[in-house]
Amino acid sequence: MHEFSAACSIVEAAVEGAKGHDITKVTAVNIDLGEFTFLIPEQLAFNFEIASQNTIVEGAELRINPVKGRLECTDCGYEGEVEPDPEIPEQIAMFAPMKCPKCKSSATMITGGKEFVITNIEAEVET
Ligand SMILES: [Zn+2]
């Protein structure tokens, strides 16, 4: 239930963000979602719907902007996009070092793809 706790934290942040702005209803929440969070967008949207029930965020649309994983290799200097290894289960891949797509070295640093942030909240304000 990785996605459910993630969905809850989005809802909490959106509710928190809406406070003190005379917002009557949050209509959309935009987020950046990095590939290395290993969250499945469809699952996240589904859990978001459940988690937002009976809050000001209920019925809001979750718009997910996927962010590609990137890494930097300290061995060969490669810097760029990388696909998660489909052979490694995600429970392990989350903690395992990513292999360089060029030289297969594990001496890599992840430079992108761990994003999990709300970039924008759209809401209706009381008039
Ligand atoms: Zn390399």
Image: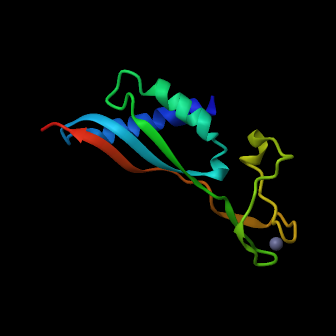
Foreground: 26 or 80?
A: 26
Q: Residue furthest top?
A: 54
Q: Which residue is found at the position 53% from the left and 35% from the top?
A: 45
Q: Which residue is found at the position 16% from the left and 36% from the top?
A: 126
> In x, y percent, where is residue 68?
64, 58
> In x, y percent, where is residue 44?
56, 35
Quick check: 84 above or below 18? Answer: below
The N terminus lies in quadrant: top right
Q: Residue furthest left?
A: 127
Q: Which residue is found at the position 55% from the left and 54% from the top?
A: 115
The C terminus lies in quadrant: top left
Callout count: 0
Quick check: 45 above or below 108? Answer: above
Q: Is residue 11 left or right of residue 25?
A: right
> In x, y percent, where is residue 3?
59, 34
Q: Residue furthest bottom?
A: 77
Foreground: 99 or 57?
A: 57
Foreground: 30 or 3?
A: 30
Give the quarter the ligand 1 occupies.
Answer: bottom right
> In x, y percent, where is residue 89?
81, 41
Q: Is residue 115 left or right of residue 75?
A: left
Q: Which residue is found at the position 47% from the left and 36% from the top?
A: 9
